[in-house]
Amino acid sequence: MYDRHDKVSSLIKEEAAKFIAHEANTDPMITVTQVTVSSDYRNVTIMITTIPDGREEDALVWLKRHGRELRKSILKHTNLKIIPNLDFAIDVGEKHRQHIDRLIQEEKNKKLEG
């Protein structure tokens, strides 16, 4: 069973992803990977990755510039009592997972070729 933090996190993740899909340019494509909510619900960190790799800083600049509009979108499309302050960060863990997946795939390809 989900607790309230999980529900709020999921709701904000969904709204952030919709906002980004609708408002952001597709170069780079920004993906919301996870959202963490503070214990008092007043602060949220939205973790992102980008395609292509290496464009995370551009995405962070765009997100910080449009953070106010994202907060308004969350207010408009949810029934949250507290609209949190938003912070954005690069999901380094997801980047490491993707890198490991690439290495595994390369090793599998080498075995098939050799």
Image (cartoon, helix red, strand yellow):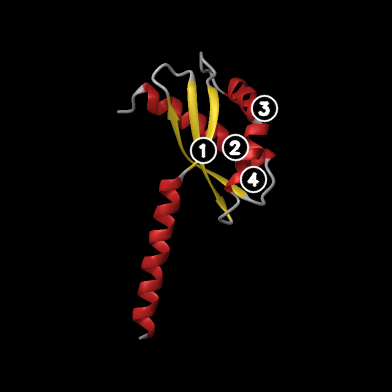
Q: Quadrant of residue 37?
A: top left
Q: Which residue is mark 1?
A: 89
Rendered position, 103 above or below 4: below
**Crowding at mark 2 (Cα within 10 Å: few <14, some 14-19, many 20+):** some
Question: Element under label 1?
Answer: strand
> Disc 2 and disc 1: Cα gap in Å?
18 Å
Q: Say which mark, if any, is on residue 18.
A: 2
Q: Position of residue 82 (x, y in %)?
A: 51, 15
- Type of amino acid under label 3: Glu
> Disc 4 and disc 3: Cα gap in Å?
18 Å
Q: Answer yes or no: do the residues labelled 2 and 1 have beta carbons within 8 Å?
A: no
Q: Which numbered disc, 4 or 3, marks the residue that appears first in the sequence?
A: 4
Q: Which residue is mark 4?
A: 58
Q: Which numbered disc, 2 or 3, marks the residue that appears first in the sequence?
A: 2
Determine the residue positioned at 41% across, 53% down. Answer: 96
Disc nearest the viewer among 2 and 3: 3
- Type of amino acid under label 2: Lys
**Crowding at mark 1 (Cα within 10 Å: few <14, some 14-19, many 20+):** some
Q: Say which mark, if any, is on residue 48.
A: none
Q: Which numbered disc, 1 or 3, marks the residue that appears first in the sequence?
A: 3
Q: Which residue is mark 3?
A: 69
Disc nearest the viewer among 4 and 3: 4
How many marks the image carries: the answer is: 4
Q: Answer yes or no: do the residues labelled 1 and 3 have beta carbons within 8 Å?
A: no
Q: Which residue of the protein is positioned furthest toward the left in this rendering? A: 1
- Type of amino acid under label 4: Asp
Question: Element under label 3?
Answer: helix
Disc nearest the viewer among 2 and 4: 4
